[in-house]
Image (spheres, helix red, strand yellow):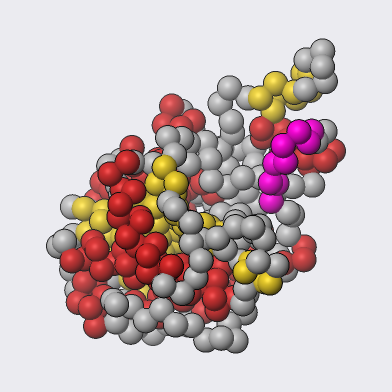
Amino acid sequence: MVIETSVDPMLEHHTYGQMLERLHGYTDAAVHVRTMDGYLKDPALVSGWGSPIAFVDLSLTDDPDSTIIITAGRHSPEYGGAEAAVELIDKVLASPGMREYLEHGEITIVPAVHVDAYGLQPEQRPAMYIPETGVYLDKEDFAQFDADRNDCHDTYRFDPATPTYQCELNYYEQLFEDPELDPNGMAWRRTFPLMTREAFAVARLVEEKKATRENVLFAADLHETPREDFTYTTIVYEPELVLVAEDAAKRVGEKYPTQASLLHDDDCTFTGFCNTLEIDAYTTEGSPFDGTRHRSMAERVEQQLLFLDALFEHYLGKE
C-alpha cells in the first residue's frame, strides 16, 4: 500500500466552492493551486459559464521530471470521483513514498472538470442523460439533460479551435443538427460532435504536461455509473493496459464487488485522447449502489482510492 485508502465514514459531498476553500487552505509547500487559463496563459480556457477551472500540482521541485494526471467530476451526478480526487491530496501528502516521488516528480489533480455543475447544489444540477434502448427523446426532452463532458477529443485532434458555443446550445443541439429532421422525424447526428469548453481546456493542459515533462506515468479519469445493477469496473482503450487495469481492480475487489475491465476502441474520450499522446490512461467507473442501497460517500471514495493506490504501486515501482 502506497497511500492510505480508508476514508472518514462521515464524509459528505461538497460543492465546487467548498472544494476551492479546501484547496486554498493547504499550507504544505508541495501544494500549488492553479487555474487552466492562468497556467496556460489563455483567457479562453474557462468553463461554459466563464468560471476558472482549478487544478492542483503536487510537487516539491520547481522542475518536475514526470507527472501523474488525475481528473474527475466530468458529469454532474458522479460525486464519488470528484471527492476522491480531493481526498487524494491528503493521502499523497501523508505518504512517505509519495512525498519521496514529489521530490522529483509531480501529481496533477483536476478535482472537478465540470465546474459549472459542481458549483450548484446537487438538487439544482441537470441530470446526466443515460440512453434507454428504443426510447426516443425529442428536443424538449433532451434540453433538460446535462451535456456529456467526456467526449469529442477526436474532433479536438482534427480542429483544436476553442469552443465558443457552450452556453448557446442545449444537450440536443450539441448532439444533433437542428432543426433538420429526416422524414421519420429523427434528427441527423452531427458528423463531428461538439466539444465542451471544459474538456477542451483539460486536453490543452494534458498536452502541455506531455510536452514539458520527461514522462507522464499515467492518467486516470474518475467516473461513476449510477445504476443499481452495476459494480465497479475500469475501461481502457489499449489492449496492453487491460492486465494492469485488472490487477489494480483486484485491490478494489478485495472489499467491493467488481466486474471485468472493459476494452474499448473509441478514441473520442479523454482516456482515448491520452493514449494518442502515448500516455497510459484508465477510466474508472465506481458503483454508488450496493444493490438497491446507496453507498456512503466514504465507500464511493474508497473504491477510487484503492484503484489509484494500486496504480501508484505499479508505476512508481517501475521508476
Which stretch did the figure color magenta?
Answer: 128-136
Image quadrant where one finds the C terminus: bottom left
- Residue 197 at least partly seen: no
What residue appears at the point 28 percent right and 71 percent down from the top-left corner?
59
Q: Looking at the image, which is closer to me, 32 or 158?
A: 158
Position of residue 269 measured from the top left corner of the image (x, y, whole percent): 48, 41
Q: In the image, is residue 293 above or below residue 41?
A: below
What residue appears at the point 82 percent right and 40 percent down from the top-left corner?
141
Q: In the image, is residue 125 above or below residue 175?
A: below
Position of residue 296 measured from the top left corner of the image (x, y, whole percent): 61, 77
- Residue 217 at least partly seen: yes
Position of residue 225 measured from the top left corner of the image (x, y, whole percent): 60, 56
Left or right of 278 on screen, residue 249: right
Position of residue 290 measured from the top left corner of the image (x, y, whole percent): 62, 69
Left or right of 82 on screen, residue 176: right
Q: Looking at the image, which is closer to me, 10 or 258?
A: 258
